[in-house]
Image (cartoon, rainbow, N blue to C red):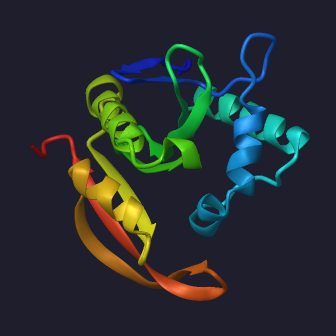
Amino acid sequence: MEPVEINAGLWYLRALRCDDRLDDRPSVVASSQDPEIARWRHRPPPEPAEAEAYIRRRAAEWLSDDRYTWAVCEPTTGEMLGEVELAALDLCHGTAEAACWALPGARGRGMTTNALSAVLRFAFGGVGLHRVTYAWADGNTASARVAEKCGFRVEGRQREAWVVDGRRVDVLVAGRLATDD
């Protein structure tokens, strides 16, 4: 599938870019340097060349229907403030895994919840997915809030599944169906 842009009200969602008009490399590098994002999410090394490779991988993943990724942007400038994705896409079974992050200046303003909600509407209505899961490490209260506000229902706990701050932590797994209210 070609990348799809989404108007999410106060936020604009588009494919990640590094061209002569928009350059998301600084935001990707900043996400790799932010201790809170790095604590919970795997990020590329904080170098412009690595950020460019990351952006190019994301573009290829759109075309191969492996992962759909959106830069969450300030609509008037196009500045990337976060990212939302549908990964592990299985179009045959109608499933995907959602994930997201936000740069420090964009946190606490409802951006991530708004963007993920818009992506879920696209996933269920535009792509025809039936089920999207969302996972977060125990202790990540921001992700727990996003999951709750986006209508995910906790379905289970994976014991000691991720490493956070050098120790094993449980991961909560939640799901949302196209048929959920």
**Going by the picture, which residue comes out furthest to the left?**
181
Q: In this view, does 19 lie to the left or right of 80?
A: right
Q: Where is residue 11 in the image (x, y as percent from the top left)?
A: 43, 25
Q: In this view, does 17 lie above or below 149?
A: above
Q: In this view, does 22 lie to the left or right of 51?
A: left
Q: Is residue 67 above or below residue 12?
A: below
Q: Where is residue 45 in the image (x, y as percent from the top left)?
A: 82, 54
Seen at 61% across and 30% down, the residue is: 80
Q: In this view, does 164 lie to the left or right of 22?
A: left
How many labels sit on residues?
Answer: 0
Asked which quadrant contains residue 21, the reply is: top right
Q: In this view, does 124 lie to the left or right of 44?
A: left
Q: Where is residue 143 in the image (x, y as percent from the top left)?
A: 40, 60
Q: Is residue 24 above or below residue 180?
A: above
Asked which quadrant contains residue 16, the reply is: top right
Asked which quadrant contains residue 61, the reply is: top right
Using the rendered image of the protein, determine whether residue 93 is visible from the camera's viewpoint: yes
Using the rendered image of the protein, determine whether residue 57 is visible from the camera's viewpoint: no
Seen at 33% across and 28% down, the residue is: 122
Q: Where is residue 20 in the image (x, y as percent from the top left)?
A: 81, 11
Seen at 34% across and 43% down, the residue is: 113
Seen at 59% across and 63% down, the residue is: 36
In the rendered image, which quarter contains the C terminus?
A: top left
Q: In this view, does 125 lie above or below 50?
A: above
